[in-house]
Image (tube, grey):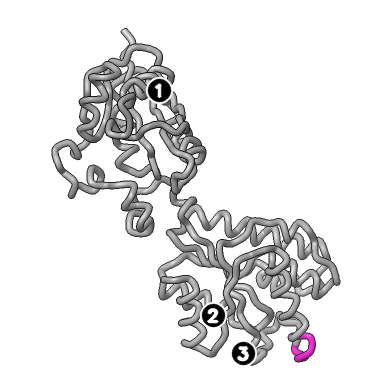
Amino acid sequence: MTKRGFLLGKFMPPHAGHLALIHAARALVDELTVLVCWLPDDPIAGEARLRWMKGLAPDCRVVGHGDIVPQTPEDSPDFWPIWRGIVAAAHPEPIDYLFAGEDYGAELARQVGGLFVPLGGRVLGLTEDPLSGLSASAVRADPAAHWAFLPKPVQAHYRRTVCLHGAESTGKTTLAAALARDTGALTVGEYGRSHCEAHREPLTLDDLLLIGRAQTAMIAAAAEWAGPLLIADTDALMTAAWTEMLLGMRPAELMEAPKADLYLLLEPDLPWVDDGTRFFSDPADRHRFARIVEQVLLDAGAPFVRIAGQGDERLTAALGAIDV
């Protein structure tokens, strides 16, 4: 005879405790239904959580409920009739096991049917246990502190990408290394520099589009291994500025590429240094390039903070902008 189980939660966001509960429950039944509940003003959109849970529990029936309904019995005398209807819609078959990690599951089982199976240690008060003690509100308050217990989609939701943006010789690579040292963040280097070192020919439009695409691809690939913070030496918006400066045009493809969460716009207040791949030693050209670089951010609607100063002053300003 088919054994059917049911559990529900907000999963705001899903974490290792939730997944441990679901995986254990799934091992005990032939079919498991997971109900993802949300309200319109939740801090994480319910549709996103439903999408995450469908991906994280592909062998379960995952359904969502986002209507405004009472959240506790004290909210309405019709609390239990309403929730019996919600559960019946999500799980029309008889429930054999009602799974929950907390003691509310006992009354829920009495109301909707099924044997209450209290998986995990929270019912016993084992809140110091790394899995049983995990709370979604604590994760929301400090995702970085709970990073190891977050599934990949949730990590992607909370990960911040900070991109350095500035004209030639404004210290992007030096600053990226210093930020990585002080924050422990993963960094993504500059593909354009590698391209120019490898080919040493005048850059064509095709070259610049490849540079933008390669940079975007490198950032996306590195993000899979990054922690809460990813630092990019540059991205396609900087390539757009280069294309305008060199060719007098700004390709839409580069402007529409994925954006960082924050850009650090490095002021051109450092001495210009020729490293063998730089173009604009003339102060007038450098000033014009700096204007283009800033305008690209403005036209893209990208959030940015200006960073100026020498040495430690520049680093301190950057750390303050990142707020670490």
**At 41% across and 34% down in the image, what residue appears?**
37
Secondary structure under tag 3 reads: loop
Q: Which residue is mark 1?
A: 86
Residue 225 location (% of width, % of height): 47, 55
Q: Which residue is mark 2?
A: 174
Secondary structure under tag 2 reads: helix
Q: Quadrant of the C terminus?
A: bottom left
Q: Residue furthest left?
A: 124
Q: Residue furthest front?
A: 77
Instruction: Name which residue type carries label 2.
Output: Thr
Which of the 4 quarters of the picture holds residue 247? bottom right
Q: Is residue 26 visible?
A: no
Instruction: Name which residue type carries label 3.
Output: Leu
**At 72% across and 69% down in the image, what residue appears?**
296
Q: Which residue is mark 3?
A: 270
Q: Where does the magenta region start and end?
A: 281-286
Instruction: Name which residue type carries label 1.
Output: Ile
Q: Is residue 155 above or below residue 59?
A: below
Q: Main secondary structure of the magenta part?
A: helix
Residue 213 location (% of width, % of height): 69, 58
Q: Nearer the viewer, mark 2 or mark 1?
A: 1
**At 32% across and 30% down in the image, what residue appears?**
76
